Each structure stands twice: as structure tokens, then as C-alpha cells.
């Protein structure tokens, strides 16, 4: 889509909302002129137009915190863009993941998908940390996640079997809190297994999306 096809604001700019393609979390709001838009398409990295400095700039050019483009959509009026991006590091200049962190009306519900990716990142880090260990931990020493990864696939699968059975029992007992606890343990161990087998949450989401179509 050519830049001339968009409906621009009074300053000749196009508002751009950027969200994390994995979690859907809104990361920032920026603006593009034609140069920033074309450079975004060309480089695959989000570029903006600075209204204060009146110049085009590449997000992350100084900090290294780039926003790698996954997809770009226009809204129904063609006057706003939605960019799904894979962020490298924090997006906000304050060091926060998102520029939107000042609560006006606070939700009491956690972002559902975010915790899965947080857990995935934590498990990945535990796996990397194993390489630095001088002594291999037991189940009762250090990280339980590291212990599972060191023990390997058979151990992890055994734990999944145990947690599956406990989840079934909780369901049969009609105990909501118990179901939540056991299902949480099951999901955690599944994430460890995915890591052990080199499968990412993104792969699971992609398969689910394809089946949903």
C-alpha cells in the first residue's frame, strides 16, 4: 500500500500502534511520514518520524532496542497502522517493556498469554545457565527447572504423566482451586518438555490458529 493512499492527520503524519506479536501487548504509539513508512517496509525494522526533532529515525538505532516487523495492518479508515513486531529489548526509553505502564484504571486480571512467554524465557535462561554450573544440581538443590532439563526427556515425560493424573483427579473431585493448581503444574511441565524438544510456544499457537480457521 502506497503512503499516498492513507488518510493523514493535519501534520501529514500517520499514527502507528506497535504491539508485541507474541502477546498482543501494546508497546508504543508513534508517527510515520512517507520516508519512515518506506524505510520500515524496506528494512523490516520500525522507523518513525519525530515530531519534536522533525526528522525520521530508526527505533533502536542508538539503544539497539529494535522493533522487527512481523506484520503491518491498516485500520478500516486507512488512517492508522497496527504493527505487530518482535521487540529486541525494552521498547520504552525508561527501560520498560512498554511505554504504557501508568495505570489509570487498573485491571485485576493478568495478561493471559504474557505469562507463557515469560515462563518460556525463564526456562530458556535456566537451560543456558546449566552450561555455567560447576556442579549438576539435584532436585533439591538450585533450580528445579535445571534439574528436569538435566535429567532429560524421560524424567520430564514422567512428571507430565503424574501432573496429568493429578489434574484428572482434581476434575473428578470437582474442586476448582485444585484444578487450577494442578493444571498450572501440568502446563509448566509441558513448557519444560517443549524446551527440551526444541519446540516454541509460537509453534503451538501457529498450529492452533491453523486449526481454528
Image: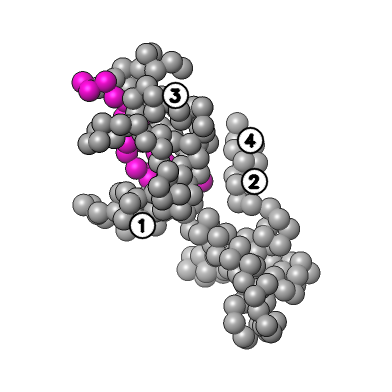
* Residue 130, above or below 70: below
Identify the residue shown where x is 59% and y is 38%: 209
- The answer to whether 152 appears left or right of 177 in the picture is right
Cα–Cα gap, marks 3 and 4: 31 Å
Image marks 1 and 4: residues in contact by CB distance under 8 Å: no
Say which label, 2 or 3, has the lower sequence index.
3
Q: CA distance from mark 2 to mark 4?
A: 11 Å
Which of the two discs, 1 and 4, sits closer to the camera?
1
- Viewer-proximal residue, 208 or 18? 18
**Which residue corresponds to mark 4?**
210
Q: Is residue 16 magenta?
A: yes
Return the disc, 3 or 1, that comes first in the chain's sequence.
3
Check disc 4 and report its element: helix, strand or loop. Answer: helix
Residue 118 lies, with reference to residue 208, above or below; the image says below
Sequence-wise, the earlier of marks 1 and 2 is 1
Q: What range of the chain is rendered magenta?
A: 10-30
Secondary element at image label 2: helix
Query: What residue is rendered at 29% in x and 35% in y?
Result: 50
Please rate how many residues cluster around mark 3, counting C-alpha atoms within 10 Å: few if below 14, some from 14 to 19, many from 20. Answer: some
Mark 2 against mark 4, which lies toward the viewer? 2
Q: Which residue is mark 2?
A: 203
Q: Is residue 146 above or below residue 193?
A: below
Q: Are marks 3 and 1 in contact (CB under 8 Å)?
A: no
Residue that numbered label 1 is attached to: 95
What quarter of the picture does the C terminus occupy? top right
Q: Position of residue 119 (x, y in %)?
A: 54, 62
The Cα–Cα distance between marks 1 and 4, rounded to whole angstroms, is: 35 Å
Amino acid at each position: 500500500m502506497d503512503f499516498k493512499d492513507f488518510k493523514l492527520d493535519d501534520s501529514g503524519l500517520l499514527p502507528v500502534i506497535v504491539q508485541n506479536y507474541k502477546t498482543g501487548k501494546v508497546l508504543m504509539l508513534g508517527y510515520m511520514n512517507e520516508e519512515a513508512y518506506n524505510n520500515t517496509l524496506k528494512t523490516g525494522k520500525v522507523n518513525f518520524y519525530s515530531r519534536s526533532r522533525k526528522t525520521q529515525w530508526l527505533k533502536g538505532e542508538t539503544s539497539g532496542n529494535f522493533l522487527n516487523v512481523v506484520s503491518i495492518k491498516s485500520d478500516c479508515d486507512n488512517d492508522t497502522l497496527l504493527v505487530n513486531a518482535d521487540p529486541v529489548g525494552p521498547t520504552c526509553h525508561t527501560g520498560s517493556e512498554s511505554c504504557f505502564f501508568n495505570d489509570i484504571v487498573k485491571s485485576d486480571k493478568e495478561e493471559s498469554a504474557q505469562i507463557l512467554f515469560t515462563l518460556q524465557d525463564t526456562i530458556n535462561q535456566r537451560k543456558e545457565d546449566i552450561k555455567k554450573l560447576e556442579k549438576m544440581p539435584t532436585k533439591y538443590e538450585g533450580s528445579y527447572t535445571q534439574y528436569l532439563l538435566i535429567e532429560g526427556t524421560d524424567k520430564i515425560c514422567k512428571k507430565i504423566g503424574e501432573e496429568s493424573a493429578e489434574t484428572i483427579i482434581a476434575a473428578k473431585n470437582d474442586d476448582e482451586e485444585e484444578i487450577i493448581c494442578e493444571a498450572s503444574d501440568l502446563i509448566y511441565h509441558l513448557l519444560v518438555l517443549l524446551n527440551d524438544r526444541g519446540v516454541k510456544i509460537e509453534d503451538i499457537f501457529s498450529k492452533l490458529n491453523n486449526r481454528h480457521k
